[in-house]
Image (cartoon, rainbow, N blue to C red):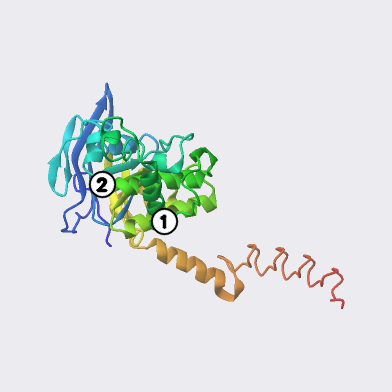
Amino acid sequence: MSSTTDTNHPDAAAPRTDNRTPVLEARKLSKSYGHVRAMVDADFELMPGEILAVIGDNGAGKSTLIKALSGAVVPDHGEILIDGKRVTFRSPIEARAMGIETVYQDLAVAPALDIASNLFLGREIRRSGPIGKLLRVVDARAMRTEAQSQLDALGVRIPDVRQPVESLSGGQRQSVAVARAAAFGTKLVIMDEPTAALGVRESGMVLDLIRRISGRGLPVVLISHNMPHVFDIADRIHIHRLGSRVAVVSPRTHTMADAVAIMTGAARPEEVGGRSHYDERASQRRRTDRDGAGPDGAGPDGADGAGPDGADGAGPDGADGAGPDGDGETRS
């Protein structure tokens, strides 16, 4: 996929050539808080089935943009379109009614409630008949069955949906929040820093979950500061700076260094690109694999011609030409 940039920005290069109708689009969104302009003519496009990462430095306006798209903030100017039709969100409830689900950084789960209750929080299934309509008694069995089915479909391994969320690990809690969004999101899912507080293993679990959601045809917006995660999972990368979009790039045409340079203003969008992130990683692997050498002809630990412990021509214990006991010969 080729890179695209915002044609309305002074640093813009070529316009988007994709003729498909975006699932979610924003045009010229602006939002001010007193004298502070949080969004300035910000544009946004999410294409069908894609994972779109949104990156930007602190204070770039990412959060304001996402809040406007999810109904938490009403922009001063501009328009939002779903499938090409203009819509107006005055609250997150209205955005949810249009099929937009958001997983916030604080997860918005109730720790004392069980997994099934959290999945249906605010949308509980009622018992049939007068007991459900008049007394509003929930159908706990139906909720547990549906919750287990949803978790199984996404490959989330939690043995019992009756256990409280507070007993889960951080990655499992994040999975519950993501599964809830996937269960009710019919248009798209927005995820705000889903791996920020997670370890390596749990982060990988959440990234796999995002891939499964996208594989079901549901587009995902991923807000993240973790560049390796962004370049590992995103189809396109929306770069936000000083309240507006400055570029949209692809991991197939740009490296992490390119994206950071655009994000910080160190380079204009048209000044970088053309060398893919995947090419960079493949080149690094080739340099590492060549004759067992590292990036500069070094061994695995970086010393020229070094063995595992970094001494020139050293054996396992670091003495030049030494055997295991360091006296120049190997003893049997």
Which residue is at a point 58% across and 66% down the rendered structure image? 294
Please tell me which residue is depicted at 49% across the width and 34% down the height of the picture. 112
Q: Quadrant of the N terminus?
A: bottom left
* Residue 223 in sight here: no
Which secondary structure, mark 2?
A: loop
**What amino acid is labelled 2 in the image?**
Asp
Asked whether 34 or 139 is in front, the reply is: 139
* Residue furthest to the bottom: 332
**Depicted 54 relative to depicted 329: above or below:** above
Q: Residue at x 31, y 32 (%)?
A: 136
Element under label 1? helix
Question: Would you identify the image quadrant in which residue 102 lies?
Answer: top left
Q: On the rendered structure, is 252 left or right of 286?
A: left
Report x, y in % for residue 257: 42, 53
The residue carrying mark 1 is 152
Is residue 187 placed above or below 232 in the rendered structure? Answer: above
Position of the C terminus, as image quadrant, is bottom right
Judge depth for marks 2 and 1 and give the one in front: 1
Check contact, mark 2 vs mark 1: CB within 8 A: no
**Which numbered disc flags the more N-terminal residue, 2 or 1?**
2
Give the spatial CA distance, label 2 vs label 1.
46 Å
Residue 11: numbered disc: 2
Q: Can see residue 163?
A: yes
